[in-house]
Amino acid sequence: MKVAEMFTTNVNRSQRVRNDEIDLFGLTHPGKKRAENEDHFLACTVHPEVIVHATSLPNVDLLPLRGEWRATIMLVADGVGGNADGGDASRITTETIMRYVSSSLQSYHDTGSLEEDVFLESLRVAVMEAHQAVRTEAKQRGGPKPMATTLTLGIVIWPWLYVVQLGDSRAYYYWDGKITQVTRDQTVAQELVDQGVMPRERLASSPYRHVLSRAVGGEAEEAIPEVTRVRIDRFGSVLLFCSDGLTKHVSDDEIAKEISKNSASEDVCKSLLDLALERGGSDNITIVVVRRRIMTPPMGTPVPNV
């Protein structure tokens, strides 16, 4: 699996993010036009943890049983079809990815011990398991249309963000007032632009701008995701994942403006949701935001310059 790397940065190892620096929030809303919410999302962090089954200690809850942060997982899946099958496709995909991550995906090593080839193969297998799970469910139902969903999966293993992409849900990276779309929309219209068949100026008005060229499930035998790697160890970095229910109504510049205005991830999500709803809310809307709080580094710790 090939990895596209955004931003040329230094390769010096920087200090791992601390638990108190992580601000993670997500929400989903059906919008104003859809009876069903076909979106599903996941926002979680991974920690080593001690589970006490029995002890003589009186205040075991006060002990540091949860260790420091090891990884962050963000996922947005937008079901296709406008009915319950789309919602089931996104749910099955989210459950399958999470089941695979929790049992098999070796993503929780320190950066120095991470074998990237093994890790990328694990991502490919996870996506294929979700793809086959959705196709199997669709076959069992025997419906007239195939079940399918987008998938935008982000896994942070310090100091890198790996994004796995199928479809047109998006991942953004924001820092110092600038927002960058990490993913590429996998739609028929975007493919035509990339191939030089259609000018970019016509992309926003193309009838194919929301027709997916790749997805989890559907008719294709294989799901071939695009994987992008971004170094994100700047203090104040923000990651935003969303379904197209947001970006149909809110521009990239407006997303950046709301991030800059709001210091908490929850406030960013809610303000962007309100904006999308005010402008019609024509689709399901899902937003996940994680930011590294700007805090004073420990004494003697160099601030990364990337």
Image (cartoon, rainbow, N blue to C red):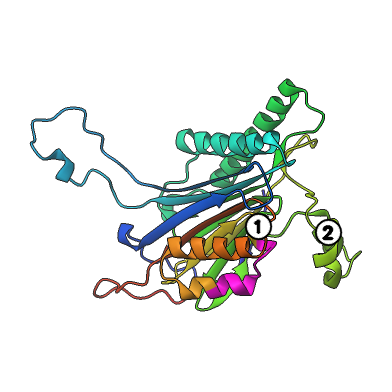
Q: Residue 192 vs residue 246: left or right?
A: right
Q: Residue 51 vs residue 74: left or right?
A: left
Q: Which residue is drawn at 82% across and 29% down?
A: 144
Mark 1–mark 2 distance (CA, rounded to whole Å)? 22 Å
Q: Residues within 10 Å of mark 2 (few under 14, many from 20)?
A: many
Sequence-first disc among 1 and 2: 2
Q: Residue 79 or 61: which is nearer the viewer?
A: 79
Q: Give residue 189's mark.
A: 2
Q: What element carries label 1?
A: loop
Q: Residue 39 or 150: which is nearer the viewer?
A: 39
Tell me if residue 306 can be seen. no
- Magenta range: 247-257
Q: Residue 19 vs residue 2: left or right?
A: left
Determine which residue is flagged by label 1.
281
Whole-percent x, y for residue 274 in the image: 55, 63
Whole-percent x, y for residue 82 in the image: 73, 42
Q: What residue type is labelled 1?
A: Gly
Q: What residue type is labelled 2?
A: Ala
Q: Residue at x 42, y 55 (%)?
A: 112
Q: Residue 200 or 156: which is nearer the viewer?
A: 200
